[in-house]
Image (cartoon, rainbow, N blue to C red):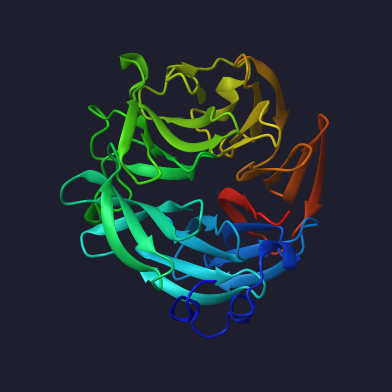
Amino acid sequence: MLRRQFLAAGAASMVAGLTWADVGAPSFLTAAIDRNNNAWLIGLSGTGDKLFQLPLPSRGHAAAAHPTQPVAVAFARRPGRFAIIVDCTSGQEVARLNAPNGLHFYGHGAFSADGNLLLTTENAYEEGVGRIGVWDVQGGCKRIGELPSGGVGPHEIIRLNNGSFAVANGGILTHPDSGRSKLNLPTMRSNLTYLSAQGAIEAIIEPPEEFRQNSIRHIDANADQSIAIALQWQGDPRKNVPVAALAKPDGSLAFLDHPDTARLKHYGGSVAMSSGGEAFYVTGPKGNWVLTFDVATGAPIAGFEVPLASGVAALDAGVAMTSKSGLSYLEGGQLRSVETGGDMTWDNHLVRLTHL
């Protein structure tokens, strides 16, 4: 059980030692802004009901769910400096983390397999290098150090099923004084970095020269540790380039063709492996389209029109996505949608909580 200084007031479920198996809501977490530009972290049921809306200081991005206890950490969108720890049984804020001076969050984090550590992607913006912040959950979620991310602009970090980690280093240099401006596009180079369970860099996989401006931003992995990648092209907009890639455990990195690639307008919003790991999905919020690929071969499977398709999360069969209507489900090749109400604009991620 996490220590009481981590819990603060209002986290009664964790004091009681509850696990994900003991709670029934919500099914998903996602960040959104409303028509008045207020930022929220929202807990959604599988039927699209808003079970809670937690106000955020500014726009949020993604969340990381604790592996055993009903707690998640919601992160600020770059270049934000806050991360909010949420009791998922009540939707209440438990505590707040702040990035140290000279650093900001990139919107993502991941827990260690035992839940004792939280790793966060960060920008050391004066140095222009990526960092992985390390937070001691057992010790009250205190920061205990930082590690090299293996590149510039680390965005998403995920834990693989062997306890190690993969980091999507997007390659884009930014500085808070310049807002969200991209400062190094002519020379940028993204990569996929593998970290050991202890945080040591084990391998760095870089795209070939022709795709070095294809920013590796969002990733997901299956049980075999194949990693699906959503790409965001930063080069010549006249080029038709892949928006999806696949990294295999042998160190190979393949950029994948799809007949509907151009529909995504150079922007893969989010990515999710299917529950069985045999396929993956890339959303295109700018193109109102979703691509699906076969993991074994990298071949395209299908494409689907989904207005403002944003976050995506695997279900036991198919996937759920945040979309213009609220939630959209793609199951057995059939698309259905449920309304969530509230006229929300969703950010790029839909986090399925681990009790499902």
Tell me, yes or no, if residue 80 can be seen here: no
Kindly tell me whether residue 84 is visible in this rendering.
yes
* Quarter of the image where the N terminus is located: bottom right
Question: Is residue 156 toward the left or the right of residue 338 in the image?
Answer: left
Q: Is residue 171 above or below residue 258?
A: below
Residue 255 vertical placement versus 229 (above, below)? above
Task: Residue 237 in the image: state x and y as whole percent.
Answer: 41, 24
Q: Quadrant of residue 47?
A: bottom right
Where is residue 7 drawn, in percent x and y?
Answer: 50, 78
Q: Residue furthest left?
A: 127
Q: Is residue 58 left or right of residue 69?
A: left
Relative horizontal placement of residue 76, taking residue 227 as reference (left or right): left
Viewer-side residue, 101 vs 334:
101
Identify the residue at image location x=42%, y=20%: 251
Q: Position of residue 207 (x, y in %)?
A: 36, 20
Q: How many marks?
A: 0
Which residue sits at x=44%, y=44%? 156
Query: Residue 311's spot in the image, x, y percent?
Result: 61, 46
Residue at image x 52%, y 65%? 37
Name the residue at the bottom extreme: 9
Q: Is residue 209 above or below residue 93?
A: above
**Closer to the camera, 323 or 133?**
133
Picture quadrant of residue 67: bottom right
User: In this orientation, which residue lies closer to the viewer: 70 or 228?
Assistant: 70
